[in-house]
Image (cartoon, helix red, strand yellow):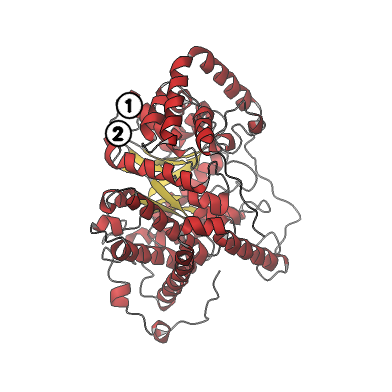
Amino acid sequence: MVALDAVYTRQSLEGLDLAHASPPPGQFPYTRGLRADGYHGKLWTMRQFAGFGTPQETNRRYHALLAAGGTGLSVAFDLPTLMGRDPDHPLALGEVGRCGVSVVSLADMEALFDGIDLGAVSTSMTINSPAPMLLAMYLVVAERQGVPWTALRGTIQNDILKEFIAQKEFIYPPRPSMRLVTDIVGFCTDAVPKWNTISVSGYHIREAGATAAQELAFTLRDGIEYVQHAVDAGLAVDRFAPRLSFFFNAHNDLLEEVAKYRAARRIWAQVMRDRFAARDPRSWQLRFHAQTAGVTLTAQQPWNNVVRTAIQALAAVLGGAQSLHTNALDEALSLPTEEAALLALRTQQILAHETGVADVVDPLGGSYCIEKLTADLEREARRHFDVIDGMGGMVAAIENGYPQREIAESAYQDQKAVEKGERTIVGVNAFLDPAHARVSTLYIDEAAERAQRAGLERLRSQRDGAQVTAALAGLKAAAAGQENTMPRLLEAVRAYATVGEMCDALREAWGEYQEIPII
């Protein structure tokens, strides 16, 4: 949280040319928003993140969310899936279906979207190292539904750099991992043209303890790295850049958060035009999804989380988000119950339809405070850019440990402030309630793991083993060479190869990454 002045005046903006830095909405560099009419033409997508247990259980939750007025789906995968391990792997024990849905093969992806027309819904999938495997499964499900790939809308997170920086769900070393990212970008540019090929994610960077300025800087610099790698691979910037999207945290400090989103649009537009010579205005426009800050949710007095979430969501709307997820009140305790998830969705609907905040584009634009904060955040982000560029780019900076050290220090200082009482968290270090209010929670038992292991055993006995072996050999050969891996992954998926088997084929080719601890 930045230190705010008690009062902002015209003098606070000395040296800032608002006519160029913050022109009307819809004009370069889009500080005030991408569209001149803001949300008048279209509200943000209300995309609730959900996934738990088996694909069948999560499918029922998806149908409930869509029936309640949700306008997009967002898939949360369990840890074994995120790490490219099948449910019968020793490292998966006790984790199957716990923090998201378990997806093992095409059969699971078919069950996950049973009864949901993929041509009519926008889907976001939060997956990184195994992103190409899960995208290939989604494409084959669409194929079998009769939905052309050209009609598919959605996002695959596919942001491996933030895994090395913050979330730590990586499999392969950074450089071959970047190849997989670029393979998705190259493949989808032609085959799935409406699909967002990377969701460059600051959310997890912020959750790890970054400040707003660090979230802004490291997220956008990750985006620059992806663009550079794609250009180096021979892709024309204006062919793929319009399908890049971003994913930011919506944290507690409302004013700082609004300024952060405005600064992000401004920086990205200038970088794409000036650094990469993009000429299509769509390449300049930073589109972003926001999620309210999970790290701010408390197990103590959990009903307070409804208030936190509403304020954070308001910041995202005032900042011009294209898509929004609101966390449920019980997520410091468990995955959300259906009732808590519905209340989170209703929070968005109340903001959209009862508050009037969607009626004005960038309503805080021109505020001395907001414009100064926007400029300050931009300046701090560009300072980090200079450091990272001096190291040779973000991959080199990650190998050097630079963003990891910066975030670790910020997290340490923040926790120290909480423990000293210098930063107040209601219900945690102030305004305590000895009654310990309780809420009902969702419990995931071992039945999901048993079901997924049994399903995997059936799959292996019924599929064509020789076809699977040949497809995996082709994938491994592609990894050893230069060809795009996506067509080989589609072959493996159609043969019902599992996520673990496909990831293992690449582990054999590239090895696993062992992180050097940051001290």
Residue 330: percent from left, percent from top = 61, 46
Q: Position of residue 325 (x, y in %)?
A: 47, 49
Q: Residue furthest top?
A: 462
Looking at the image, residue 442 sits to the left or right of residue 73; the answer is right
Closer to the chain start, of discs 1 and 2, is 1
Q: Disc 1 residue type?
A: Glu
- Asked if labels 2 and 1 touch by Cβ distance under 8 angstroms, the answer is yes
Secondary structure of the residue carrying tag 2 is helix
> Which quadrant would residue 135 be assigned to in this image?
top left
Q: Is residue 193 left or right of residue 461?
A: left
Left or right: residue 413 versus residue 505 is right
Near-viewer residue (184 or 333) = 184
Q: Quadrant of the N terminus?
A: bottom right
Q: Residues within 10 Å of mark 1 (few under 14, many from 20)?
A: few
Q: Is residue 322 visible?
A: no
**Image mark for residue 45:** none
**Mark 1 to mark 2 CA distance (whole Å):** 7 Å
Q: For residue 149, which numbered disc appears in the image?
A: 2
| For residue 141, above or below residue 154 | above
Which residue in the rendered view is the most extreme toward the right? 434
Query: Who is closer to the viewer here, 298 or 104?
Result: 104
Disc 1: which residue:
143
Q: Is residue 473 visible?
A: yes
